[in-house]
Each structure stands twice: as C-alpha cells, then as structure tokens.
Image (cartoon, rainbow, N blue to C red):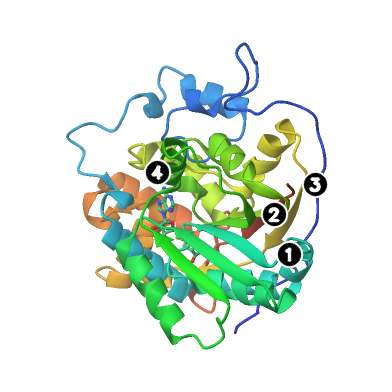
Amino acid sequence: MDGAGWEAPGREGGWVKGGWIGRGPAGSTAWDPRSIPRTARGAQGAPARREELQGAACPLLQPPSMASPMRNLLTDLDRYVQSFRVFLERSTEHQSMQGFVERHLPDVIASIGNGKSTINVLSIGGGAGEMDLQILSKIRARYPGATINNDVIEPSADQISKYKERVAQASNLENIKFAWHKETADEYESRMNAEKKTKKWDFIHMIQMLYYVKDIPATVRYFHSLLESQGKLLIILVSGKSGWETLWKKYASSFPLEDLCCYVSSGDLPRMLDSAGLKYQLYELPSHLDITSCFTEGDKDGELLLDFLTETLDFTKTAPPELKRQVMEELRKPGCSEIRDGKVFFNNSQGVIVVEP
Ligand SMILES: C[S@@+](CC[C@H](N)C(=O)[O-])C[C@H]1O[C@@H](n2cnc3c(N)ncnc32)[C@H](O)[C@@H]1O
C-alpha cells in the first residue's frame, strides 16, 4: 500500500439546531438545492452562487442545446466504469482512503456493534468493493464473534461482478454475508417505501457516490434516518480544497450533466448537516491524480481521465475546441494541479464526513 501523502486530518464538527435544507417544512426559508439547476456542480454550496446561477445570462438556465454532441458520462455506464478504473490506477484515491481506514475507522466503529450478535452494513455505490472489504475487515476485527450482513446498492452490473470476484478470491471473510442489489440509491429508497420497509443499519457508507443522486440533502437525511441508535454514516466526497472544486466552479455550466449528477464537495456538507442539527466529524485526505497523459493527443487513458474529470462522454471528441483548450489550460494551473518532474499532478484531495446517529 502506498500511504504517501497521508497526513493527520483536521477535525471539526458540532451541533447546530435547525431544519433540513432542501426539504424543509413549508414556508421554510432554508436554502433549497432543488431550486438550483441540476447542472450546478460547484454551485450547491451557497445562496450567493445560486443567485449567480439565476442571472439571465447564466448558461445553466439554458440547457445544453439539443444539437450539442456532448453527453454525460453516466449515459454510458460501461465507459464511466472504464474511466473510473483508469482514475483509480493513476490516483492515490484508494491509498488515501486506506490510510483513513487504518488510522481512524477503528475509532469510528468502536461502538456500532456493542451488545449485538449481528451487525448490518449498507454500502451505497460500493463499486468493485475495494474499500468495502477493507471496511468490513476492520468491523470484523472489532467484533470477531458477530455475523456481519453487508448489503450493496450498486447500479453497475460490471462493478457488481467485479465485487463478487473479489469476494470469491478473498480468504478472510468468514461470518460475512453479502447481498448485492443492482439499483441506485434513489431506487433503493423507492423500493423500501413501496415495500413499506424501514430496515435499520449499524454502519452505512457512501464513498464517492453522492454526486449521482437526485437530491443530496434528502438522500443524506433518508439514509441517516436508517441508522441504528449507535450507528454511523460515513460519506466521502472530493474536498472543497481540491482541484475538482476549481475546475467545476469554473466549468460546471459547460459540462453536460443532464440531471444525472451534480457537483458537491465535502465543503458543502457542514452547512447541510448543521441545518439538520446533526453531529459530525470531518477529515481531510490528501490525494493526487497523475493527469500527464491527458496532454498527449490520442492517449486512450488520457481521454478516459478527461471524461472522468469533466463527466463528459468522449470529451476530447465532443467538446467545442475553445472549451477543450480552456479546460486543458485550467488543468495545468496551480488551482488544479502541481507540475513536478515534467508530470502533472491534479489535486484529488478528499473529505471524509462521519455523521453521528
Ligand atoms: C466513483 S465510484 C465509487 C465506487 C466505490 N465506492 C469506490 O470508492 O471505489 C461511484 C460508484 O457509484 C455507482 N453509482 C452511480 N450512480 C449511483 C447511484 N445513483 N446510486 C448508487 N450508486 C451509484 C457507480 O456505478 C460507481 O460504482
């Protein structure tokens, strides 16, 4: 494991009374993200940004022209997964998370299973299971006698099949039962509502998936409501101090989000959680992504990385030349990246938020 780049995190958090933003009671003056165009990556965090988006000239209010060939990357889940895998190969994303799992997860899960013979874990957007298995191994180490039920909500069949292969090859998963559900977080909620079920969970995690739900505060609220009295909700998002924030703040309106995702960073969560009166802790995980290949024309991995960075299917082929030129220039700038030994390292820092029950 490459733990390079890991630093002791800063901690913040606290209780603030208030109602939920987003789905507050009627007449609530709380900020309502549903009133923001879905293409507002980078703009979810503040009313000031919303006002900016409501200006008449705001391109966000003028959805990408029907003639635009640009499509959201999630319209092709296979290519999305392909580009995510290249992203994982070229970044220290999972290594940084692993640092968190080693150093901080044991404290986070210290009491989730006290007095229980069965511990229920819900993974939302679990991908191919790399991080899930690391989390499970810590839970198992803390509660060696307990049975662990691990349910995975994941819409990509390819990711589920990779996850199953990983489980089949692993040797230390005794007492852990897996169930995979090929569906999105929103579909899970609808299914549970239709079945009138409210199954509770001791640990719920959503690692790098909250961008893809329809209503972020409502999703956090729903899954938080499913926590057992000693349960924990773990959320990982790109950090508000990362290159993602710089890139998306500037170019969100030019990328074709098509209601499939929206930008949110860990910097946006405190406001949302404070309004809900929820207690939480924040951790910052340094991480970088080598994007050097993005600058070599025709490089297939570079093209996939550009797709992932812009959430655009075939960005190099479909983006207007001027947008491409500007994005490529932006990616090299200090707000996004650092250039070392001729390589371009994009700031991929992540924020971890642990929400109390
Ligand atoms: C960036 S990947 C993260 C995967 C994994 N958690 C990790 O960190 O390695 C996002 C995952 O969320 C899944 N996903 C996409 N839309 C989703 C949704 N609406 N609900 C749940 N998962 C979703 C994707 O298929 C993908 O596996």
Q: Work out which residue is located at the far bottom of the displayed protein and give it.
A: 171
User: SS of the residue at dot 1?
Assistant: loop
Q: Which mark is residue 187?
A: 4
Cα distance between the residues tagged 4 and 1: 27 Å
Percent position of residue 57, x then y: 40, 21
Percent position of residue 125, x then y: 46, 57
Name the amino acid type tagged 4.
Glu
N-terminal label among 3 and 2 = 3
- Relative to 216, is 59 on the left or the right? left
User: Pointer 1: what residue?
Assistant: 109
Q: Work out which residue is located at the far top of the displayed protein and give it.
A: 27
Name the amino acid type tagged 3.
Gly
The total number of labels drawn is: 4
User: SS of the residue at dot 4?
Assistant: helix
Label 4 CB sits under 8 Å from any ligand 1 atom: yes
N-terminal label among 1 and 3 = 3
User: Pointer 2: what residue?
Assistant: 232
Q: Quadrant of residue 201?
A: bottom right
Q: Residue at x 80, y 55 (%)?
A: 11
User: SS of the residue at dot 3?
Assistant: loop
